[in-house]
Image (spheres, grey):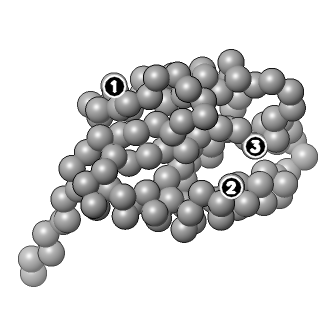
Amino acid sequence: MKGLFVGEDFCCCMGCAQAELRSIWEGRSSWEDGPMPYVYFHEQDVDHVIEGGPLNLAFGAIGTVGNVSDALRFLGRDLTSTLRQCGLEVDWFGDIDRRIAVRMAWDRRAPALD
């Protein structure tokens, strides 16, 4: 899979994000054939992190045909490997039906000083 879509604070919830991804995929140019892999977190995920939970990342592919379990498992492993290389603590055990959990402590930024 190529052309990974990455969404930060993408839509309000999982249902709206999935609908928006489908719309983006359907609006692509004809030269962009094939499935569109994605990873994102939405507004409710941010709220969960602020409350002390992990940041849950949704991942998958829009426009797939047939059994793509192996491709999605590879995508999940690639994402978790990249996150770990960046020094993040990641929980994901190869289940493509589970989201990737990134453990972190939420800190608000201090206001800018003039």
How far from the left and from the top, in percent, is residue 14? Answer: 60, 57
Amino acid type assigned to the residue bearing label 2 in the image: Gln
Residue that badge 1 annotates: 85
Disc 2 crowd, CA 10 A, few/some/many (<14, 14-19, 20+): some
Image quadrant in which you'd find residue 61:
top right
- Quadrant where the image shows the C terminus: bottom left
Image quadrant in which you'd find residue 82:
top left
SS label for mark 2: helix
All told, the count of numbered labels is 3
Is 11 positioned to the left or the right of 84 in the image? right
First-in-chain label (1 vs 2): 2
SS label for mark 1: helix
Circles 2, 3 touching at the beta carbon (< 8 Å): no
Residue that badge 3 annotates: 62
Amino acid type assigned to the residue bearing label 1 in the image: Gln
Circles 1, 3 touching at the beta carbon (< 8 Å): no
Figure check: 98 above or below 73: below
How far from the left and from the top, in percent, is residue 94? Answer: 52, 22
Disc 3 crowd, CA 10 A, few/some/many (<14, 14-19, 20+): some
Tag nearer the camera, 1 or 2: 2
SS label for mark 3: strand
Disc 1 to disc 2, C-alpha distance: 28 Å
How far from the left and from the top, in percent, is residue 64? Answer: 81, 35
How far from the left and from the top, in percent, is residue 75? Answer: 59, 27
Disc 2 to disc 3, C-alpha distance: 9 Å
First-in-chain label (2 vs 3): 2
Figure check: 21 above or below 91: below
Residue 18: mark in rendering: 2
In front: 114, or 10? 10
- Quadrant where the image shows the N terminus: top right
Residue appearing at x 77%, y 54% in the figure: 22
